[in-house]
Amino acid sequence: MNLAQSLDSVSGLECRWDTDLTNFSTFRMRSQGDLIIVKTEAALAVLLRTLKSAARSWRMLGWGANQVLAPQESDLLIQLDFTHDSEILSVARDEYDLPASVGLNLLTTHAIKFGTKGWEALTGIPASLGGAIFMNAGTALGEIGAIVKRVRLMNSDGLIREEIITPQSFKYRKNTFVQKDEVIIGAVLFHHGLDVSLPDKIRKYQEYRRQTQPLATKNCGCVFKNAAPARQAGRLIDLTGLKGLTVGALRVSHKHANFMENAGGAAATDFLEITRLINQQMNLHWGVAFELEVKAV
Ligand SMILES: Cc1cc2nc3c(=O)[nH]c(=O)nc-3n(C[C@H](O)[C@H](O)[C@H](O)COP(=O)(O)OP(=O)(O)OC[C@H]3O[C@@H](n4cnc5c(N)ncnc54)[C@H](O)[C@@H]3O)c2cc1C
């Protein structure tokens, strides 16, 4: 039996074989491949066990806000679409048990309403909760790691474990606890008290981001990790005069030099070329090469 025959009839799985994936990342890179949208934990367990026995490679796709998809994806992509009880975010509470597919925008809306301290760190980050935890997403106002208490994970045998978060669980833009072939399926969040000034702080930061980032364009957020506070990628790319540098349909943003904008139709090959050119110039002018923050296969 092939994969499609094994998986098409599994309840809770929406299988899209050899489909157009272009609209599944915020960067909108041209891409084609297999995608399975998963509605329940039980269906995820069946899927992971089946993929393991078929030796098929896969990876997780959240909102695709930090991924450069390949023209032809060889990994099967898995996206979670678990339902969540909207009651959970309707009042301020000590703990919030949420599925990994919840969007951070809902968490920011909650923080604006109730002033949940620590949650301001998530302002403006387009992400699913699972993708944000995997990346330890954060802003100048903090990181998601500071408001995560426990994380639930499923392994490739469909077994579930819980990770208790400690100060060692997160580093800059990464976690230290998700093992190979594990999926974050949910997390328990908390806050550091309620703060009436928080909504104002969040709104101001949202405005600041609108002014400084090309949010209306097709992009993947910051492309490079900062090497050090004094070696910020955006600043050095700007100082080198590379704003506006274009390869195919990809351009270094005029608004923020660590962002790249896809005018439409760009492919991962354009991305590899433009990042290679930038790092060549960085090496020449500053003796530094920036590591990618975005995940590019
Ligand atoms: C306009 C814009 C602004 C941005 N601003 C910021 C910012 O201020 N700060 C910041 O940190 N980031 C920022 N980003 C990047 C991006 O939003 C974050 O990296 C975010 O965490 C990605 O979440 P995602 O759900 O889209 O995950 P994806 O990009 O789809 O995946 C990211 C990684 O997580 C893995 N993953 C996803 N879901 C799971 C899961 N359930 N279990 C296990 N692994 C999983 C994926 O396999 C991949 O390796 C920005 C992006 C854009 C487009």
Image: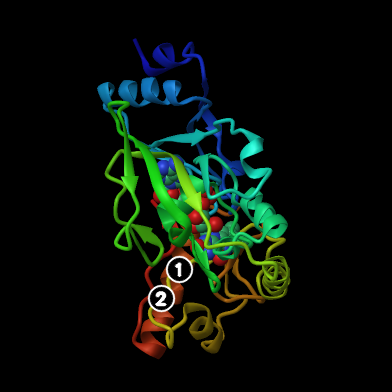
Residue 186 vertical placement versus 249 (above, below): above
Q: Nearer the viewer, residue 84 or 59?
A: 84
Residue that carries the numbered disc 1 in the rendered image: 275
Q: Residues within 10 Å of mark 2 (few under 14, many from 20)?
A: many
Secondary structure beneath dot 2 equals helix
Callouts 2 and 1 close, C-beta under 8 Å: yes
Instruction: Name the residue at 50% across, 53% down.
Output: 190
| Type of amino acid under label 2 | Asn
Amino acid at dot 1: Thr
Q: Secondary structure at mark 1?
A: helix
Relative horizontal placement of residue 255, taking residue 54 as reference (left or right): right
Q: Is residue 12 above or below residue 292?
A: above
- Horizontal arrangement in the rendering, residue 197 relative to residue 16 (left or right): right
The image shows residue 195 at horizontal and vertical percentages of 64, 66
Camera sees residue 91: yes
Asked if one can make out residue 249 in the rendered structure from this viewpoint, the answer is no
Q: Which numbered circle lies on residue 59?
A: none
Residue density around tag 1, few if under 14, some if 14–19, many if 20 or more, within 10 Å: some
Q: Is residue 159 above or below residue 131?
A: above
- Which quarter of the rendered picture does the N terminus lie within? top left
Q: Which residue is mark 2?
A: 279
Say which residue appears at 52% left-offset and 19% top-offset.
Answer: 12
| Quadrant assignment, res 229 | bottom left
Give how far across and how far down residue 95 sits, in percent: 51, 47
Image coordinates for residue 75, horizontal then vertical, percent: 38, 37
Q: Give the Cα distance between marks 2 and 1.
A: 6 Å
Q: Residue at x 41, y 90 (%)?
A: 285
Say whether residue 35 is left or right of residue 166. Answer: right
> Residue 14 sits in which quadrant?
top right
